[in-house]
Amino acid sequence: MPKRTKAEAEATREALLDAAEVIFLERGVSRTSLEQIARQAGMTRGAVYWHFKNKSDLFHAMLDRVKMPLRQLLDDVEDPDQPNAPLESLRLATLHALGRLQGPRSRRVHTILLHCSESASDVDILALQDQLACDCYETMVERFEEARDTGTLIDNVEPEIASRMLMSMILGLLHDWLRDPERYDIGDVGPRMINTFFERITPTPAKPLD
Amino acid sequence: MPKRTKAEAEATREALLDAAEVIFLERGVSRTSLEQIARQAGMTRGAVYWHFKNKSDLFHAMLDRVKMPLRQLLDDVEDPDQPNAPLESLRLATLHALGRLQGPRSRRVHTILLHCSESASDVDILALQDQLACDCYETMVERFEEARDTGTLIDNVEPEIASRMLMSMILGLLHDWLRDPERYDIGDVGPRMINTFFERITPTPAKPLD
DNA sequence: GCAAGTTTACATTCATGTATGTATGCCTGT
DNA sequence: ACAGGCATACATACATGAATGTAAACTTGC
């Protein structure tokens, strides 16, 4: 049953990516063969090699379906008519990100990135993570600097350090939680961590967070 | 030139583990063959199979050389004659741990654990990480609870959340830094993060940290 | 009918585990 | 104290299995 219509071809491409998520997750990237992915999608290796150059190419395509840069998250939570304080935007964006991380696809792919793939394998994971992390860090520093300049960041906390703290907390939490999501509810623990953090680095005795 | 003396045999065992660290680091665990490890150590696969059951066994042996449970770190920094406040012990232990992480062997092995190995491969990384993390978390919670009860932890910060925050920060920092240790000096950034964290969750306006 | 999709077949490469070979260190009896 | 015997510490060879990439065949949309 070869050659399908154009739409069907696109569908098998998506099916292959779905299949890759599943198999990568349960067997690890390096241990899954393209054969296994193809079979999971009800195809053969030929289909894979048609749509993707190789395993690395397929992996990148899989990632592209869930990318969410911090800047975009900030845009999502910022109301242009009534701009928030920079730290409040950051807090909301972070919470928003945590929420999205719980979606099944995002969760699967991030688990693969953090736990089921290794550097120096078919895919250059480190470069990928590096790119995301640096972008994220720089954006955070901008906000924290703005906060410091407007007096909404406590005095003896440097923007660079605050950024690394926040980034590390999120990355660490994600890494820990994804290792075994049944242990605790990240939808509960996450926000409490984030809120505590922002509460503790914000000067005014604080109107209670909603 | 087979059969060496007992001491020499132990030396080749260590050499094999050293070799494993190097090759795992540069090629990733799943992509390194036992042949490569053996050659790096100037041996053949026969030697590897003599000293270790298989790759997984070798991996565990490699980890055993650098394990440092939090309780032991706490013991290291605690002076039994003059006990610190619980949070001060935690802070010192954390700083102490960060220091040790910079030793070349510890650094290599942790990089391998976090970046060059994948779950569901020859080795069950997740179980390993899980064990370390849970032990660490529980120990932290104990201290934070003690701190809360003695009034050295700020009121609206729960011990469980504080523990997760601290653990995540360290794990996240490590994960981020090890991805490319040249980017920044963890010996500088790390302590500043840790100190800021403890300073912000400690009630009394604070005598300055040394 | 030509090219887009997909399958099947094939050649190559490479890691694993095991089995076997072998020389040497070590120990035991006398 | 030393000669034989056995276990140790490796090396070598082989059998197996599995994954990769490519090429060729096939089938259907346009």
Image (tube, coloured by chain):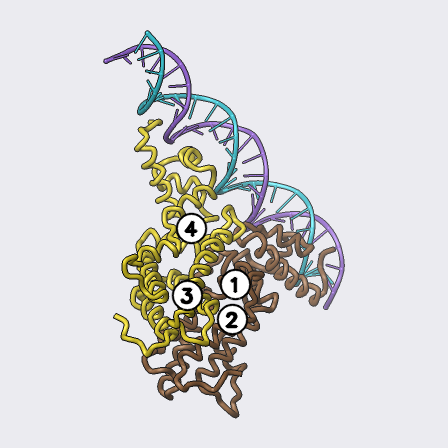
Chain colours: A brown, B yellow, C cyan, D purple
- Disc 1: which residue: A177
Chain assignment, label 4:
B
Q: Residues within 10 Å of mark 1 (few under 14, many from 20)?
A: some
The residue that appears at 59% across and 59% down in the rendered structure is A21
Residue indicated by mark 4: B27
Q: Kindly identify which numbered label has been placed on residue A190.
A: 2
Task: Say above or below: B116 vs B3.
Answer: below
| Residue wearing tag 3 | B146
In space, the residues marked 2 and 1 are separated at their CA atoms by 10 Å
Mark 4 vs 3, N-terminal side: 4
* Residue type beneath disc 3: Glu
Chain letter for mark 1, please: A
Residue A188: x and y, percent? Answer: 55, 71
Left or right of B83, for residue B44? right
Q: Mark 2, chain letter? A: A
Whole-number angstrom distance, CA of label 2 to CA of label 3: 23 Å
